[in-house]
Amino acid sequence: MLLLHCALLWLLLLLPPSSRTQKLPTRDEELFQMQIRDKAFFHDSSVIPDGAEISSYLFRDTPKRYFFVVEEDNTPLAVTVTPCDAPLEWKLSVQELPEEASGDGSGEPEPLEQQKQQMTNEEGTELFSYKGNDVEYFVSSSSPSGLYQLDLLSTEKDTHFKVYATTTPESDQPYPELPYDPRIDVTSLGRTTVTLAWKPSPTASLLKQPIQYCIVINKEHNFKSLCAVEAKLSSDDAFMMAPKPGLDFSPFDFAHFGFPSDNNSGKERSFLKSSSKFGRQMSSKPRVDLHKICIGNKNIFTVSDLKPDTQYYFDMFAVNTNTNMSTAYVGTFARTKEEAKQKTVELKDGKVTDVFIKRKGTKFLRFAPVSSHQKVTFSVHSCLDAVQIQVRRDGKLLLSQSIEGVRQFQLRGKAKAKYLIRLKGSKKGASMLKILATTRPNKQSFPSLPEDTRIKAFDKLRTCSSVTVAWLGTQERNKFCIYKKEVDDNYNEEQKKREQNQCLGPDTRKKSEKVLCKYFHSQNIQKAVTTETIRGLQPGKSYLLDVYVIGHGGHSVKYQSKLVKTRKFC
């Protein structure tokens, strides 16, 4: 029962030739527990401890052999090998122990060197072999006594792996047990979210051991072990810069390859620090397309922030937080739903079209002139915040810019050409705009606007019953209408902003708010300024003034609103 004793193999394999032994010692449990706690005890050795998982590294095409001893016949035995980032070939075999080693201490023992040669040169009986990247097990309820050899080989690349062996598999149970149905179910699927559910591990529900679940999401493939995930998350450079045999390093000192270390010996002996040949210090760099999320003991979780119409692979690992050892559920995959296909709005030549865009939303419009044309004109009136516009002709990008207010673009035409207009809304809020496409250059529905659409109020000309304001015009003769509305004294910029929809015309105003309409233009753009005095106001009251310019096609554009206040005492 007391098996796999490390001190036994130190005696058989590591003592000098002058040493003698008469009997293979049994495992001292107190000593064993002390050795397990001191992970450095197993460094630089080929001994597998009983009941503890070891991590190690394989160089490509360089085999590695491990040993352990089973002292008594009919002993339970379990061996688990976990490949991390490459497939492994491994074989488990057993040899009989030397007669003298298991004797009663009488007679002259053989020299240890002779025993060692006898034990390691013999082939032994093969018990199990495997080739692949699955977590694979050898389990026997009744194993013969002997020297067991575990041979491992990686033919693909340098890699690391984990090995666990025990003679008390029933009581140890370091790996979480899977439920009778170990599959992950996709319970809900959206454009950017996937909801997963799974049955809890009996280790948590029945044995009440501390279990947490870790979800892994990526776009490439499912993973068969958490060890493989951690290897993928680590920097590739760390493995490329692995030391070659013959350099001054410990083959078990791999803290810099992502293996945890509970003592300082690894840091002191790190070849990256002691040798300038390898230059820089390695660091772990998570990959963008691979994410690991540990969520505690919940058994339902929604993964968010995914891309639409994209296939993702999902893996679930139950992790025993006492032993830090894990078991993989059966992974799954799912494709997120496509973005809702947007309807493309058809523009008619010379007709104004109203467009509404959600915050950060996108709208597509199509213009296909029925006749040949030399030029095409797009007039856009952004009612609220700035919007992004792109225009493509038969797939070729002709225009891409941000627009505010009223803008006009004239593009070279082409026979039988089709134009695709992409509009992207503001990040601040919803966008509204009006757009006109035409092949007739004289067809102008939108009035021309000056660069500055503010209304200026003259403070010195304020009276108790009137205010005087001015605004800029253009060289084009347009109709201007001015409206007033009394507002409360606590009227603020936020309320004012809500009324800044430039596309709302005079037809939405009350008749009582109208002050006057007049035509105005100037051939000299420097003198295109008009003033107006609004009379009949109440003393000490606040008013919101709006100026509308109305084009030849009847479409109006509002200038920026102006808040004014009459004098209280005159």
Image (tube, rainbow, N blue to C red):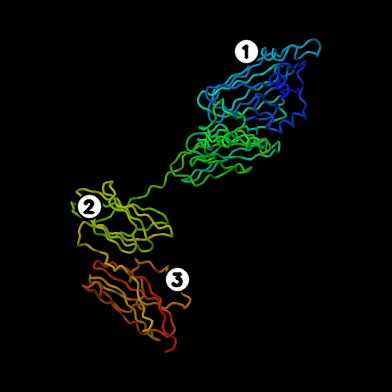
Q: Amino acid at mark 2?
A: Pro
Dot 1 or dot 2: first in sequence order is 1
Amino acid bearing label 1: Glu
Q: Are marks 3 and 2 in contact (CB under 8 Å)?
A: no
Q: Mark 3 or mark 2, which has the lower sequence index?
A: 2
Residue 359 can be seen, yes or no: yes
Q: Nearer the viewer, residue 72 or 33?
A: 33
* Quadrant of the frame with the N terminus: top right
Residue type indicated by callout 3: Glu
Q: Residue visible at 38% across and 72% down?
A: 561
Mark 1: give few (<14), some (14-19) or many (20+) Cα within 10 Å: few
Residue depicted at x 22% and y 73% = 524
Is residue 257 among the parts visible in the rendering? no
Q: Is residue 192 left or right of residue 355?
A: right
How far apart marks 3 and 1 lie (CA) works out to 89 Å
Few, some or many residues within 10 Å of mark 2 (<14, 14–19, 20+): many
Please tell me whether mark 2 sits on a helix, a strand or a loop. loop
Q: Which numbered mark, 3 or 1, is in the foreground of this view?
A: 1
Mark number for residue 369? 2
Mark 3 or mark 1, earlier in chain? 1
Residue under pointer 1: 123
Instruction: Give the CA distance from mark 3 to mark 2.
Output: 44 Å
Name the image quarter holding the C terminus: bottom left
Name the residue at 52% across, 24% down. 60
CA distance for labels 1 and 2:
85 Å
Query: What residue is disc 3 on?
Result: 493
Relative height, residue 312 to residue 441 (above, below): above
Count of numbered circles in the view: 3
